[in-house]
Amino acid sequence: MGIMECSRNGCDQILCECYSFEYGYICNECKEELKQFIKTSLMDLPHANIDDLIEEFMDMRKDEEVTCCVDVDEYIDREFDNK
Ligand SMILES: [Zn+2]
């Protein structure tokens, strides 16, 4: 048992249980976010390559706002605030 550092860019989790031969370790939090990211991406681009999407996700910094996980209703309500 060594350090199992999450391979996602900007993620500092070091106790990951999930491992991919291709991408290395990933923590549960990133894994759930990744699933959401892929589902949302496939809605927009049904023919997108999932491996490409995983790669894109792993490169995306964790603290970056991931568009797919933004609550659109909330976002728009905030953007077009009643003045
Ligand atoms: Zn992570």
Image: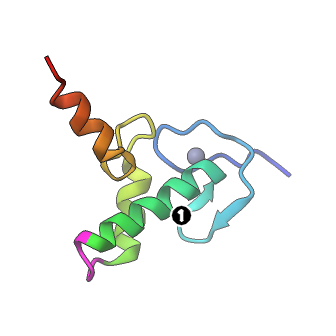
Spot occupied by residue 11 in the image (x, y as percentages of width and height): 54, 39
Residue 4 versus residue 46 in the image, above or below: above
In the drawing, does residue 57 fall left or right of residue 17? left
Comparing 20 with 42, the one in front is 42
Callout 1 amino acid? Tyr
Is the residue marked 1 within 8 Å of ligand 1, measured from its CB? no
Residue segment shown in magenta: 44-48
Residue 64 percent across, percent down from the top left: 36, 37
* Element assignment for label 1: loop
Measured from the top left, where is residue 10 in percent x and y? 48, 37
In depth, the one of 67 and 8 nearer the eye is 67
Please indicate whether residue 42 sits to the left or right of residue 34 in the image.
Answer: left
Residue under numbered circle 1: 23
Main secondary-structure element of the magenta-colored stretch? loop
Is any part of residue 27 visible from this angle?
A: no
Left or right of 35, for residue 39: left
Quarter of the image with the C terminus in it: top left
**Could you tell me if residue 15 is visible in this image?**
yes
**Residue lying furthest bottom in this view?**
47
Q: Colour mode?
A: rainbow
Question: Foreground: 37 or 79?
Answer: 79
User: Residue at position x 23%, y 74% from top?
Assistant: 45
Is 59 magenta? The answer is no
